[in-house]
Amino acid sequence: MMAQAADFALSGELLRDLKLWRSRAAIVGIAALAVTALGAIAWPAQFFRSYLWSYVFYLGVALGSMAWLMLQYLSGGAWGLVIRRPCEAATRTLPLLALLFVPVLFGIPSLYRWSHAEVVAADAVLRHKHAYLNVRFFVGRAAFYFAGWLLCSWYLNRWSETEDREGPAVAHRKLATMAGPGLIFWGFSITFMAVDWVLSLDPHWFSTIFGMLFMAGQGLSSMAFLITLMVLLSYRRPMSEVLTPRHLHDLGKFLLALVMVWAYFSFSQFLIIWSGNLPSEIPWYLERLRGGWQYVGLALVLGHFALPFALLLSRDLKRDFNFLAAIAVFILFMRYVDLYWLVAPDFLKGSLGVSWMDFTAPVGLGGVWLAYFLLQLEKLPLMPLGDPHLEEALQHGRE
Amino acid sequence: MIKPVYGVIAEFESPTALVNAARAAREKGFRKLDAYSPFPIEELTEALHLHKNKLPLIVLVGGIVGGLTGYLLQYYVTVIQFPINVAGRPLHSWPMYIVIAFEMTILFAAISAVLGMLALCGLPMPYHPVFNVPRFAFASRNRFFLCIVATDPLFDREETCDFLQTLGPREVSEVAP
């Protein structure tokens, strides 16, 4: 049985809401980016730092959504159907994110010590790493990651639209077949991306779990974003008719699992380096655990792990739409703090500090990204009409 | 003299009929209900309002006790009983304790979940009156049963039987104690 497109088309009032959010996001975003651009002229070094960590955050939301999309084609489940369209819309923002990566390329000399020939020449470790850490290869790798991500995004969207029109006969198998290799590519590309763009800010340091930490972070950022969005959509047709507490409960469980996975990876990295106590490994943590940064670290332990973990244990709270959205928004905020804690101490060398551009850059990028995301979200009905499990997903938590 | 009964039991042919019957019986005001099915039915748990029980609390307490046990055990061994200087680290090296404290939390929580579940269900239970109903053997195959226990304040041998008859069962029978 094919569902009717009209059942899940965006209602007039929802479209009006989305247009309002979109124009507000665009105005705030462009204004904040304009102010940040002034900062770029006055103080380019600070601009590139603030831009880098903010950029990595929004890229994480889009790529995390892509991973959820592929995961749900592999695993199935009603949770996957209700978030599929928002996930697809998030992956369609990747062309915009590829464009927004250009300022990072201009920032290479300012951000990365290894890009200066005289620094490399004077440093034995960097000389050994030069075969990997050099500007040309760095740019080439970035182009390769984006090519792969754009290809995955194109494929996922193309076959999903085909499934809407022609039913699941061919399309669903195509999507399921692609999802496995796609997730493997995602895992590898995120590992290398994290090492290239963030870890190499301190080119002497290394950590093999760093990529996993980013995978967990991306999954967490995107799931928190999706939960917030689903709760906002649930006030208007068609999602007010579709979403049940059980759908949200499933998404809340993912949020809890990822809070734990993030804490597990973070602590593993810390414990191994702490117990090894080697001069090549500990400086990264020393920079992040003195001069005020230790309080940011403590805030992460409490706010990025302990508090959401304790609250998300409760079944009733996971089924409460507004409460879950509040936790999700809080987690999004802690994701900003986490990325700031990963990036900024490399530049500030042991003294806590924050620039006004660390506020305008995330607001600006976020506004522009959100406006583009909402534009993508409006294009298709909010549920995948051709999916063979649509009825099942709609009945989830209803009887 | 009328023989006392444990309760009355109705047999249904589908899980949906059982869930509807359980819901109707709750609405009618019956509280001492139990349902039997060959497989778990999540809606049934909701229909019978069984979600609220003490098990989560037992598991939480078990987990906390486990975590503290793990932590204090290591503290006792490495600080009090057998202090060794390892590469100049403090004796109370808490980061190293976390892993084992975490594992003990999981272990104790899991064990208390199993034991708590058995205790709350009253298991092991060598005798239960429902097995006096000959057709109850089908509860582990393809039939679904709803039992209203005689200790329910609203229980009346005849009326309760009649009420269960209205819910579309295959058969209603009395359960000998």
Image (cartoon, coloured by chain):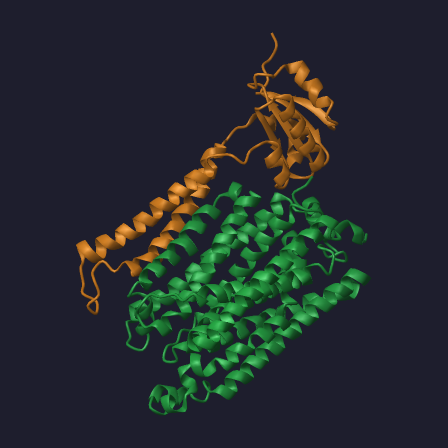
Between residues A38 and A171, which one lies in front from this camera angle? A38
Left or right of residue A248: residue A8:
right
What percent of the width, then of the height, locates residue B64? Answer: 36, 45
| Residue A391 point in image, percent of width and height | 74, 49
Report which quarter residue A61 is drawn in. Answer: bottom right
Residue at 26% from the left image edge and 55% from the top image edge? B74
**Chain letter, colour orange:** B
**Residue at position x 54%, y 75% in the image:** A189
- Residue A286: x and y in percent read 30, 69
Quadrant position of the C terminus of chain A in the picture: top right
Q: Which chain is green?
A: A
- Name the foreground residue: A175 vs A282: A282
Q: Is residue B85 left or right of residue A20?
A: left
How far across and down, in percent of the image, does residue A363 sit? 52, 62
| Relative height, residue A344 to residue A237 (above, below) | below
Q: Residue at x 64, y 58 (%)?
A: A22
> Vertical placement of A374 versus A395: above or below?
below
Up-down relation of residue A109 to residue B57 (above or below): below
